[in-house]
Image (tube, rainbow, N blue to C red):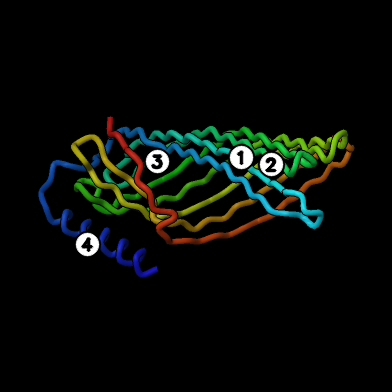
Amino acid sequence: MKTTLLLFITAITLSNIYAQEDSSFGFTKGDFIISGTMSYSYQNSDSFRDNIDGNMYQFGTKGHNFSIIPEIGYFVSTHFMTGLKFGYISSKTESFDNDLYYYTSKGKGYSTSIFGRYYFTPQKRVSLFIELEAGYIKNTIDSDRIFQINDLTASTNKIENYSVTAAPGINIFINKDLSLTSRIGRIGYSNIKDNFSNSQGHTGTNKRDSIDASISLNNFYFGLLYRI
């Protein structure tokens, strides 16, 4: 928490320093921007131990998650930008247990959102901003669960997520058109609907609302932003 607070104070100090300088860096009314994020994670784990019969017990998991979310924006005024985000997400997980249990899960989906962003010192090299975003995510996950030999259960989850979030951030120009940009935490509300069905004829719907807020280094990462 102390590290995060120091990081945020440093960002404010840098913004104030550059705000006092006459710089050709920064945004102005009529600018277009292209930006976005891309992430990939991979997991491969195996564990071994003896069971009560003295035989070796093995459990393993493999999987990956991938997402790419490009965004475009337009400065309707010197301080305010509005824009759109479109994204693709995918995931795959495989788990097994001594060849008696085998589980696979594959997910694909997309995301879309509109956002507005206010820059406090838009025509300077370093500027803090605040962003408000309304988004929608749809994801379909198909799963197969095999227990022992012939016991197969297939299921499908169709998940929809409506959300509204607010996030502070910082933008730092590398040159006159290219900059680093990052959000520093977030506060948001989500409404999630999960429709479930399986090969045994069972169906169900799960609805839930959630509110989350965080300011930590886990939410602090830099992406690239290009001004057209």
2 or 3: mark nearer the eye: 2
Residue that badge 1 annotates:
62
User: Does residue 190 appear to the left or right of 171 in the view shown?
Assistant: right
Sequence-earlier tag: 4 or 1: 4
Q: Looking at numbered disc 1 in the image, what kind of residue is underneath it?
A: Lys
Of the numbered discs 3 and 1, the one sitting upstream in the chain is 1
Foreground tag (3 vs 4): 4
Question: For the residues marked 2 and 1, what is the alpha-carbon distance in whole angstroms?
Answer: 7 Å
Viewed as shown, does residue 60 lie left or right of 224? right
Q: Residue at x 35, y 70 (%)?
A: 2
Residue at (57, 42) in percent of width and height: 44
Q: x, y percentage for residue 30?
A: 28, 34
Pointers 2 and 1 in contact (C-beta within 8 Å): yes
| Residue positioned most to the bottom | 2
Mark 3 belongs to which amino acid?
A: Thr
First reached walking from the N terminus: tag 2 or tag 4: 4
Seen as rendered, the residue at the extreme front is 54
| First of labels 3, 4 by sequence position | 4
Circle 3: element type: strand
Q: Quadrant of the N terminus?
A: bottom left
Residue 95 numbered mark, or none? 2
